[in-house]
Image (tube, rainbow, N blue to C red):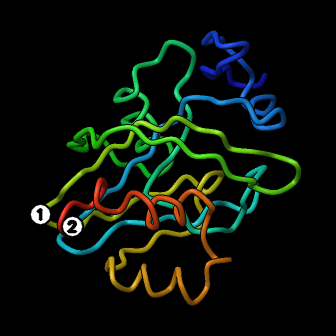
Amino acid sequence: MDDLIPAWVDGVLTPVGKLAAHQQGLRHMAVSVFVLCGDRVLIQRRALGKYHTPGLWANTCCTHPHWQENAATCAHRRLDQELGLRDMPITPAGTVEYRADVGGGLVEHEVVDLFVARLDATVTPAPNTDEVMDTAWITLSDLRADLIARPERYTPWLRIYMDQHADQIFGTA
C-alpha cells in the first residue's frame, strides 16, 4: 500500500498516496536532514530500485512524513531506516519550498522542514540497501565544485538546496 503523506488538495492538507502526490505534482510536506562534521557533509547515493532519481547523490536523508507525523520524529525515523543512525542530535534549520521535475513524469513540489546534525566526529552509517547504495563524507567546497562540474550526478533537490539555501543549512560553513 502506498504511504499516505500530507499534501494540499484544493487548499486543504489531506492524506494522499506518496506516488500519487508525485504523479500529480501536488504540493506536499517533506523532511531533509544534513549531517555535518566540520566542513564535511554526509551524502548518500540513492538505491537503483528507487522509483525516482535512482543512483543519484542526495543529502544525508530525505523523506516525507507520514500523515500526522511530526517532522522531527520523521527525520529521526528516516535516519534510522535509511542509514542506521540512531539518536542523532538534530536541530531545525527552517522550512523551504521547491518544485522540481524528477523524471518519469514525476514532480516533487515540496514544503521541506530542514534539519541539521552537527557532529564532533564522523559516523559510519549502516545503509539500508533498499534505500541507499553508497554514502560519502565530502567537504562543502568539493561538493560545490562537483555540482558545477557534474550536476547530473545529483538529485534536483540537492542542487536547489546548495544553490538557493546553503546559508540557511550550513550557516558560515
- Name the residue nearer the viewer: 137 or 93: 93
The answer to whether 4 is drawn above or below residue 48 in the figure is above
The answer to whether 40 is drawn above or below residue 115 in the figure is below
Q: How many marks?
A: 2
Which residue is at 31% across, 55% downward?
169
Which residue is at 53% across, 84% downward?
148
Badge 1 element? loop
- Name the residue nearer the viewer: 26 or 66: 26
Which residue is at 57% across, 46% downward?
98
Amino acid type, mark 2:
Cys
Determine which quarter of the picture holds residue 92. Answer: top left
Which mark identifies residue 37?
A: 2
- Point out the image quarter for the N terminus: top right
Q: Position of residue 5 (x, y in %)?
A: 63, 22
Amino acid type, mark 1:
Asp
Spatial separation of the CA atoms under disc 1 and disc 2? 6 Å
Q: Position of residue 70 (x, y in %)?
A: 40, 20
Q: Position of residue 150 (x, y in %)?
A: 61, 85
| Residue 168 in the figure: left or right of residue 3 | left
Badge 2 element? strand
| Residue 84 in the figure: left or right of residue 29 | left
The answer to whether 137 is drawn above or below residue 148 in the figure is above
Q: Earlier in the sequence, mark 1 or mark 2?
A: 2
Q: Which residue is mark 1?
A: 120
CB atoms of marks 1 and 2 within 8 Å: yes
Q: Badge 1: how crowded within 10 Å, few (<14), some, or many (20+)?
A: few
- Point out the image quarter for the C terminus: bottom left
| Residue 82 in the figure: left or right of residue 37 | right
Which residue is at 37% across, 43% downward?
114
